[in-house]
Image: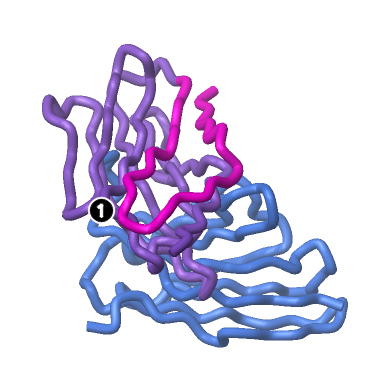
Amino acid sequence: NAGVTQTPKFQVLKTGQSMTLQCAQDMNHNSMYWYRQDPGMGLRLIYYSASEGTTDKGEVPNGYNVSRLNKREFSLRLESAAPSQTSVYFCASSEGDRVGETQYFGPGTRLLVL
Amino acid sequence: AQKITQTQPGMFVQEKEAVTLDCTYDTSDPSYGLFWYKQPSSGEMIFLIYQGSYDQQNATEGRYSLNFQKARKSANLVISASQLGDSAMYFCAMRFLTDSWGKLQFGAGTQVVVTP
């Protein structure tokens, strides 16, 4: 099992460009998440999908959109990138969204917006 | 509002020694889950160990164990017999019953450096 995979690993964008970060999991998990990690701030939730067909905003959703394409895939789109979106983006999945469910993370995507 | 505090920004430990990483939290939720993750320099987030708020016994997983003191709202991670590969950032993270997002809330992390 590959677990959670993310593409691309690195990306450089110019301000105003758009891009989609891809995430897939092969653990048959119902819930998927997108986080961003900024220096000194830990991880913050951008969007969340409790199950296929549902998505909800997290702490910092502005400037992002998501699509839960099917049970395996959850993509994050930046419509018009800004330097403030320079960060490391992590996708995660869990079997469900109960308190005791462990979230498993992908390797991350490092994004630089110039 | 819930808050997670890791008071040690960084620490050095000698190989083969044990190290304790502190994590305290502030919540009025009766039900919560507490997780520890390891982030090596390569950047991935690796799940280490989990403790539920209603679990009676402290969790253990190989060389990792939790010193869970619910009354003190403290859940310290103990790594026994440190290895060079344990050098990494360690995050305490929690999920709360009243949090409808299902999100993990993270502490700021503790950087551990294991020396020969």
Q: Which residue is mark 1?
A: A96
Q: Secondary structure at mark 1?
A: loop
> Quarter-wise, where is residue A92 in the image?
bottom left
Question: In the visual, does B72 lie left or right of A79?
Answer: left
Residue lying at 25% horizontally and 49% vertically, measured from the top left: B64
Residue furthest out toward the top: B71
Q: Position of residue B63 (x, y in %)?
A: 22, 53
Magenta region, residue range: B1-26
Q: Position of residue B98 (x, y in %)?
A: 39, 28
Residue B63 visible (yes or no): yes
Q: Is residue B72 above or below residue B112?
A: above
Total marks in image: 1
> Quarter-wise, where is residue B19 in the image?
top left
Residue furthest out toward the left: B56
Front-most of B30 and A96? B30
Q: Position of residue A41 (x, y in %)?
A: 66, 47
Front-most of A51 and A82? A82
In the rendered image, residue B13 lying in the magenta stretch gets the answer yes
Question: In the visual, does A14 lie left or right of B30?
Answer: right
| Quadrant in the picture for the C terminus of chain A | bottom right
For chain B, give the colour: purple
Residue furthest out toward the front: B116
Host chain of mark 1: A
